[in-house]
Image (cartoon, rainbow, N blue to C red):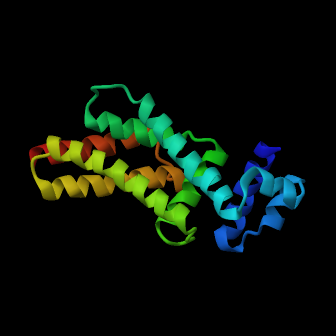
């Protein structure tokens, strides 16, 4: 039942947003009673936190764990983009909801704050590695912004680019950064 509630919650949050989604909507979609939903999750906030925040972190960490150690940074970014493009629909929904919450488009209270803190820590690691490899700090920041946009685009839209296109874009960025 808990998985049915999670699946229903993800659909309802995606369709209506955090504030417009109601516990009744989620329970009806899951085919369970309100007491059953409250038994498993306690509140809409806790449900959102587990379904979106928890899953977002889990997927992000799985992607990071699959990246081989010691590969060049351009390959890390390529791998990250490609992994996000291959996510299942429900996982894409989680990422979309998490990004909406982080951007303030769907303020989910404490869950939004937790997502922002998690992402800030993740990006700090990326920043550190880029700054170590790219000598020009302005170009390093630009590289981070562009690659973050590539990661987001991989999740949110079908840009029609194939693996070779993405590889060439990243190579161009990194080759230019290394010359700067």
- Image position of 12 with respect to 134: above or below: below
The answer to whether residue 158 is seen in the rendering is no
User: Which one is nearer the viewer's eye here, 132 or 50?
Assistant: 50
Residue 174 location (% of width, % of height): 22, 43
Q: Residue at x 53, y 41 (%)?
A: 59
Residue 173 location (% of width, % of height): 24, 47
On screen, residue 56 versus residue 8, left or right, reads left
The answer to whether residue 29 is seen in the rendering is yes
Q: Quadrant of residue 41?
A: bottom right
User: Which one is nearer the viewer's eye here, 150 or 169?
Assistant: 150
- Image position of 129 with respect to 8: above or below: above
Q: Quadrant of residue 29?
A: bottom right
Q: Quadrant of residue 22?
A: bottom right
Q: Residue at x 27, y 40 (%)?
A: 171
On screen, residue 159 versus residue 171, left or right, reads right
Quadrant location, the N terminus: top right
Residue 33 location (% of width, % of height): 90, 57
Q: Residue at x 73, y 58 (%)?
A: 42
User: Which one is nearer the viewer's eye here, 152 or 43?
Assistant: 43
On screen, residue 168 versus residue 17, left or right, reads left
């Amino acid at each position: 039942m808990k998985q049915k509630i999670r699946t229903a919650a993800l659909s309802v949050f995606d369709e209506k947003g955090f504030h417009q989604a109601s516990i009744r909507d989620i329970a009806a979609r899951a085919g369970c009673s309100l007491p059953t939903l409250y038994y498993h999750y306690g509140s809409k906030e806790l449900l959102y936190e587990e379904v979106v925040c928890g899953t977002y972190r889990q997927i992000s960490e799985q992607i990071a764990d699959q990246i081989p150690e010691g590969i060049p940074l351009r390959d890390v970014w390529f791998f990250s983009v490609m992994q996000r493009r291959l996510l299942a629909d429900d996982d894409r929904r989680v990422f979309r909801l998490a990004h909406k919450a982080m951007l303030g488009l769907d303020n989910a209270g404490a869950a939004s704050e937790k997502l922002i803190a998690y992402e800030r820590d993740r990006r700090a690691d990326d920043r550190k590695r880029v700054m170590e490899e790219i000598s020009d700090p302005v170009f390093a920041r630009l590289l981070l912004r562009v690659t973050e946009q590539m990661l987001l685009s991989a999740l949110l839209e079908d840009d029609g680019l194939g693996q070779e296109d993405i590889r060439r874009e990243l190579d161009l960025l990194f080759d230019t950064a290394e010359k700067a």
